[in-house]
Amino acid sequence: MNTIELQQTLPAVFADRDCVVSDVWHKQIAFQKGQICLVEAASGTGKSSLCSFVYGYRKDYQGIISFDGENVRKFTVSRWVNIRKKELSMLFQELRLFPELTAGENIILKNGLTKYASRKQMEEWFDRLGIADKWNQKIGQMSYGQQQRVAFVRALCQPFDFIFLDEPISHLDDGNARIMADILKEEVDKRGAGAILTSIGKHPEMNYDRVLKL
């Protein structure tokens, strides 16, 4: 996948608004592979909705979302499964980890589906992010910031052309936020991928190719 394009896309819940001021909604805009973009938003402007629309979890929008010129509304369930396995990775704001499993089990469960990362690589990411000692700890017993770092590693454990990260550092200190930014930059450069990050104020310090206001 090389391009994600939105054409006059607008959440259905916004349809009755007289005016929507946005760089994204009700515009024609394309995200390109190889670029790192930041989408800045105020709460309630549809930031998480955007991620769910692109990931195919929700369809309650007007307009068109297309991958390489193909309307995603036409995709079958099996096509979506393949896209989420090989082309599109997502770090949701609510993380979607399994609290009854350990951090390591959450990662291994995902990596077992993709066979992408080695155990050495996964443990190296944990170490750099300061959670090496949390590998065998249950997610439900970890702080939200620690969980964010686990979810970030999980999002890396698959091939992707684009990775979406919805408020990835909302509960991280500046030091861990910088480390996450460094790892993300390394991975998108290595894979030649695109990255789209969302924020309602706090975001990783990176050299963004584009900054958009939602």
Image: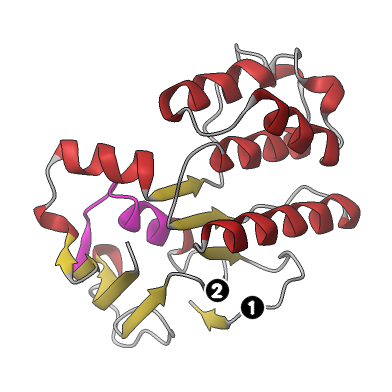
Q: Residue at x 61, y 15 (%)?
A: 105
Front residue of 122/47: it is 122
Dot 2, crowdedness within 10 Å: few (<14), some or many (≥20)?
Answer: many
- Left or right side of 57 for 102: right
Residue 182 point in image, percent of width and height: 76, 58
Relative to 138, say whether 209 is above or below.
Answer: below
Colouring style: secondary structure
Determine which residue is flagged by label 2.
37
Circle 2: residue type: Cys
Q: CA distance from mark 2 to mark 1?
A: 5 Å
Of pointers 2 and 1, the one earlier in the residue sequence: 2
Mark 2 secondary-structure assignment: strand
Q: How many numbered marks, from 0 up?
A: 2
Give the residue displayed 73% in from the left and 64% down from the top. Answer: 204
Q: Could you say which disc has been placed on residue 42 in the image?
A: none
Residue 183, percent across and down?
72, 53
Task: Choose top left, top right, bottom left or bottom right for residue 129.
Answer: top right
Q: Determine which residue is flagged by label 1.
A: 208
Q: Are marks 2 and 1 in contact (CB under 8 Å)?
A: yes
Hey, what amino acid is under mark 1? Answer: Tyr
> Residue 94 colored magenta?
no
Q: Nearer the viewer, residue 11 or 6?
A: 6
Residue 107 showing in the rendered view: yes
What residue range appears in magenta?
A: 49-63
